[in-house]
């Protein structure tokens, strides 16, 4: 069943990319395996999925060592500063860096390991108090600050928009992140570097692709309901 669901997601990603005039190969699927057992993760890996996502560092500490090092793991959930020392050892990409305090800790821990940690900046595009993410006015300062650090590499942006029953209502939030990404070079982001946009989950990933997502984070549509 997982293999069939994964194939369905791949097909939907492919069609959404074509609808928006994009190359489907430029869009990465992160299979979000939080709370799912190792047997289910093995099943999705055997179906050809190479990028997996976890939301909690503690859970990832138990799971990731069970699998081959060729699997690319991403942290897609909120990162606490006291978990950074583990996160930089576990994850190829951290999607959820949302403050200068946090990025400084990631930088410090990475330098301790003689490592450069790829990260995304999580942006609050909705202004909801309940959402993690850096507020829009603070982004230029963050981008400039990160450009001075040696232990992290900013790869792009991530957001979690409000939930709507009709995914079309999410479109403006994805569009806002895409428009924001175009401003990054003037704030210090390398103009010749690709800007990853991590946005879209099971409920709305096709809309996200149409609005420029390069990474979609899919849990339920692949693994089924928890």
Image (tube, helix red, strand yellow):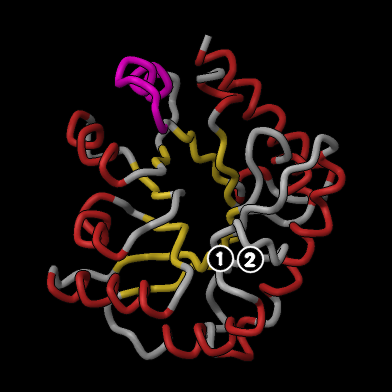
Up the image or down, 225 lies above or below 194; here it is above
Quick one: 81 or 32, which is closer to the camera? 81
Numbered disc 1: secondary structure = loop
Question: Residue 156: where, in percent of width, then height?
Answer: 54, 67
How many residues crowd mark 2 within 10 Å: few (<14), some (14–19), many (20+)? many
Please give the name of the residue rendered at 62% of the width and 29% of the height, measured from the top-left corner.
Answer: 10
Task: Choose top left, top right, bottom left or bottom right for residue 59.
Answer: top left
Please give the name of the residue rendered at 81% of the width and 35% of the height, measured from the top-left corner.
Answer: 165
Q: Which residue is mark 1?
A: 133
Residues at badges 2 and 1 in contact (C-beta under 8 Å)?
yes
Q: Is residue 177 left or right of residue 71?
A: right
Please give the name of the residue rendered at 56% of the width and 22% of the height, measured from the top-left corner.
Answer: 6
Task: Choose top left, top right, bottom left or bottom right for residue 112.
Answer: bottom left
Q: Which residue is mark 2?
A: 124
Question: Residue 23: where, in percent of width, then height?
Answer: 69, 48
Residue 190 drawn in magenta = no
Q: Most extreme residue toward the front, as rendered?
A: 129
Q: Is residue 99 left or right of residue 20?
A: left
Question: Residue 27: where, in percent of width, then height?
Answer: 61, 47
Please give the name of the residue rendered at 27% of the width and 55% of the height, measured from the top-left corner.
Answer: 87
Question: Residue 72: where, in percent of width, then height?
Answer: 35, 44
| Mark 2 or 1, nearer chain start | 2
Residue 106's mark?
none
Q: Is residue 121 left or right of residue 90?
A: right
What's the magenta region? 34-46
Instruction: Report, in whole angstroms, how far the alpha carbon at label 2 lies from the one at label 1.
Output: 4 Å
Numbered disc 2: secondary structure = loop
């Amino acid at each position: 069943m997982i293999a069939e669901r994964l194939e369905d997601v791949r097909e939907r990603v492919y069609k959404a990319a074509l609808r928006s005039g994009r190359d489907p190969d430029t869009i990465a699927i992160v299979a979000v395996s939080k709370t799912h057992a190792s047997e289910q993760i093995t099943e999705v890996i055997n179906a050809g999925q190479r990028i997996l996502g976890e939301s909690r560092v503690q859970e990832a500490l138990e799971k990731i060592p069970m699998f081959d090092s060729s699997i690319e793991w991403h942290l897609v959930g909120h990162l606490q500063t006291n978990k950074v020392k583990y996160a930089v050892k576990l994850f190829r990409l951290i999607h959820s860096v949302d403050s200068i305090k946090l990025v400084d800790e990631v930088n410090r821990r990475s330098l301790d390991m003689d490592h450069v940690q790829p990260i995304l900046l999580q942006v609050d595009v909705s202004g909801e108090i309940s959402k993690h993410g850096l507020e829009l006015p603070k982004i230029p300062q963050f981008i400039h600050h990160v450009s001075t650090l040696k232990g992290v590499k900013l790869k792009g942006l991530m957001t979690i928009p409000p939930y709507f029953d009709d995914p079309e209502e999410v479109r403006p939030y994805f569009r806002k992140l895409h428009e924001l990404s175009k401003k990054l070079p003037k704030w210090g982001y390398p103009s010749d570097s690709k800007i990853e946009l991590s946005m879209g989950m099971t409920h709305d990933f096709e809309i996200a692709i149409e609005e420029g997502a390069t990474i979609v984070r899919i849990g339920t549509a692949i693994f089924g309901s928890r």
